Image: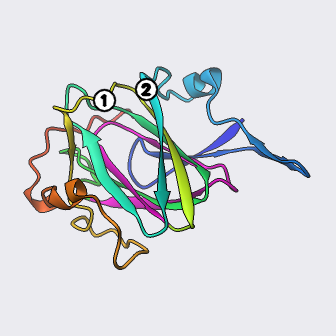
Amino acid sequence: MFELVHTPIAGCYEIQPRVLSDQRGCFVKTFHRAEFAARGLQLDFDEEYYSVSHAGVIRGLHFQLPPMDHVKLVYCVSGEVFDAVVDLRLGSPTYGQSFSSTLSASHGNGLYIPKGLAHGFAVTSELAILTYKVATAYSPTHDAGILWNSAGIAWPIADPILSSRDQSFVSLSHFQSPFHFQSHD
């Protein structure tokens, strides 16, 4: 059981599951096939992985190019992150706009990210573990990104720890998008 919260970006949802807590800790169900199907969400994921990051780290803004573009489902299972997406779909009413949300282990919330959105996060706790389910397998030749500070995101970290790869991406204004918006209304 979960609440599906619409974000300002079409097809991107915050998932707020029921968190069962007691003196032992908590239990959170992050995926339920029948509930995802009933809401028209992606059911098949080819890979699942996680990242461990320290305070002050920003990872992103990442995506895969077509035909290996994919839906992502992300959850923070330890700590807390400031999670952000940018709409890269040509023809979208929110093209170039971003949405951000705090994901945390204590709230159990996640983000459902459709194809054509760049994704990144900043670690706001001492340590954070983010899990990802992706609808297509990792493809190095389709792996891409845009510069983390080029999309107007109000990152909560002034001087982040970044990979050289994330620092080398083109800015949003120089990105030639291969993604196209398709309304599902």
Residue 138, label in figure? 1
Q: Nearer the viewer, residue 140 or 101?
A: 140
Q: Are marks 1 and 2 in contact (CB under 8 Å)?
A: yes
Q: What stretch of residues is rendered in magenta?
A: 97-123
Between the residue at mark 1 and the residue at mark 2, the CA separation in whole angstroms equals: 8 Å
Rendered location of residue 104, percent (x, y)? 61, 57
Q: Secondary structure at mark 2?
A: strand
Q: Can you identify the residue that label 2 sits on?
A: 47
- In the rendered view, tell whether residue 48 sits above or below residue 175: above
Q: Quadrant of residue 63?
A: top left
Q: Is residue 8 left or right of residue 177?
A: right
User: Considering the image in quadrants, where does the C terminus appear?
Assistant: top left
Magenta stretch: helix, strand or loop mostly: strand
The stretch drawn in magenta includes residue 27? no
Q: Is residue 83 left or right of residue 126?
A: left
Name which residue lies at 43% across and 74% down: 156
- Circle 2 packing at 10 Å, graded few (<14), some (14-19), many (20+), is few
Sequence-wise first label, 1 or 2: 2
Look at label 2 and name its amino acid. Glu
Name which residue lies at 28% across and 70% down: 152
Name which residue lies at 62% across and 53% down: 78
Q: Quadrant of residue 172?
A: bottom left
Rendered location of residue 14, percent (x, y)? 54, 48
Please, which residue is most extreme toward the right here? 23
